[in-house]
Amino acid sequence: MDTKANISKGPLAGLRIIDSTTMVAMPTGLHIMADMGAEVIKVETHTLFRTEAARLLYADNDPGDEPWNRDGSFNTLQRSKLGLTLNLKVPEAVQAFKELTQISDVIVENNRAGTMDRLGLGYEELRKVKPDLIYVSNTGFGHTGPWRTYAGIGRMFELTCGLSQFTGYPDEGPRRVGKAFFDLHVGWTAVFAILAALHYRQKTGRGQWIDLAMYQIGVSTMGDAILDYTANGRNGQIVGNRHPHHAPHGVYPCKGDDNWIAMGVENDGQWDALCEAMSSPSWTREERFTDTLSRWRHQDELDPLLSQWTRDFDHLELMALLQKVGVPAAAVMNSREVLTDPHMRARNFFEHIPHSPGSGIGTKSYFGRPWKMSKTPSFIQRPAPSLGEHNELILGELLGRSQEEIERLYEIEVLGTVPTDPPTFIPPSYEKQLEDGSLAGYDPDYSKIVGIE
């Protein structure tokens, strides 16, 4: 059976990709391609703990009998993919990987420089069995240059690339943006690079190696900051929520507990619209606030006055009010508000995916893709695979291995469906997390709220 026949048609239908990656960046790019119809085979080992599941965000906070299959991060990052376990420390696994390469279009890996070469699975070796192969190597700093051997993870690149020069508050020093900010950028960039290589192969018949460096992707997003130094020799500094030229520009408190609205007024027309929305209190006509430069110079006086007004409004209602009169403004939304946002629902951004009955996970809501294609719609093809779920399908029906051969691979621990060292972490209860402050809130009826029950 050709497993491609089981993939709903999409813009990338007929494309087969080997996903030999971990963490967030590359799995993100490849679940996007899988959503678009590519057959993505997630290759992992049962001898190591799934690193995508490091946060241990178990469905319903319950590890269950198979916690390695219940982690929310893994199920989000590996959706739409098939799953194969290969312990690449065993020669038979390396051989199976090479056989799979022969019938695939793209290989993506994110090990330290040199790791795949030592396994006998580097680009130069694999192009011998698949001359038009597209091979993507994602590392922190690339395969050339003095930093090529440095380890890199998404959490560090916002600091290394210069972004943290601007985040945080002047009296506190740099702050991280929050989550691994650049991981997602790297994933999206990988999609672009792979599609460009495929386009080149279609025209020439030749494959190639893509050396993808996360550090360079971070630096490439710094745009105006790099340009300002190149053109003017100026080095930026921490600005908090403020803007180098515009005011008011910040985040202001609203009615309720920890509710906020972000505003960015860029010109006098927007300022006049804001004043009218506030019913033009007398302080708005003071000389210190009459033009853009004066408002910027007197932000310390302006922000508290504006905050007095915003405190009387619900943040979502105030966003609608200000947007209606032409003031750039947006409510600071929490996870529940994003998931229940009527605009997101109108665009069907979140997709409800049922998991297998045996998993005990049920139906969960997953984010979709930030675009819609009128002729080739994309959607989540299937839930993430359980560990080794498609071992027999891939080795038997794709590679032609007999059942006896497959059973032998299980015996010599090339294959597995249970981790060698399963996790034993028991998450604290929601009540405990609320008590220690690691959780801001919890809705017991969340399934009804997001519409999956």
Image (spheres, rainbow, N blue to C red):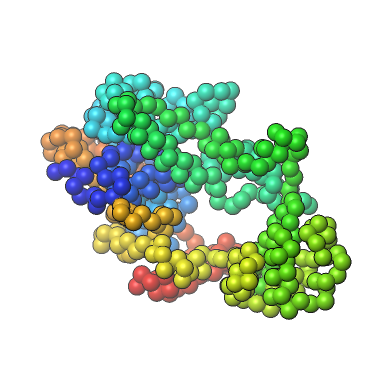
Q: Measured along the vertical axis of the image, is residue 445 above or below residue 411? A: below
Residue 153, image x, y percentages: 53, 39
Q: Quadrant of the N terminus?
A: top left
Residue 376, image x, y percentages: 30, 52
Seen in the image, is 37 located left or right of residue 227? left
**How many marks do you count on the picture?**
0
* Residue visible at 73% across and 48% down in the picture: 238
**Do we see residue 108 in this rendering?**
no
Instruction: Give 157 or 186, whichever is nearer the viewer.
Output: 186
Seen in the image, is 426 located left or right of residue 328? left
Instruction: Give 136 or 432, whichever is nearer the viewer.
Output: 136
Residue 162, image x, y percentages: 65, 40
Considering every residue shown, the one lying at the far front of the view is: 269
* Residue visible at 33% across and 51% down in the picture: 35
Seen in the image, is 41 located left or right of residue 257? left
**Do we see residue 205 in this rendering?**
yes
Q: Measured along the vertical axis of the image, is residue 136 above or below residue 57? A: above
Q: Which quadrant of the structure image shows residue 147?
A: top right
* Residue visible at 82% across and 76% down in the picture: 282
Q: Quadrant of the C terminus?
A: bottom left
Residue 169, image x, y percentages: 73, 53
Q: Measured along the vertical axis of the image, is residue 148 above or below residue 371? A: above
* Residue visible at 23% across and 32% down in the picture: 103
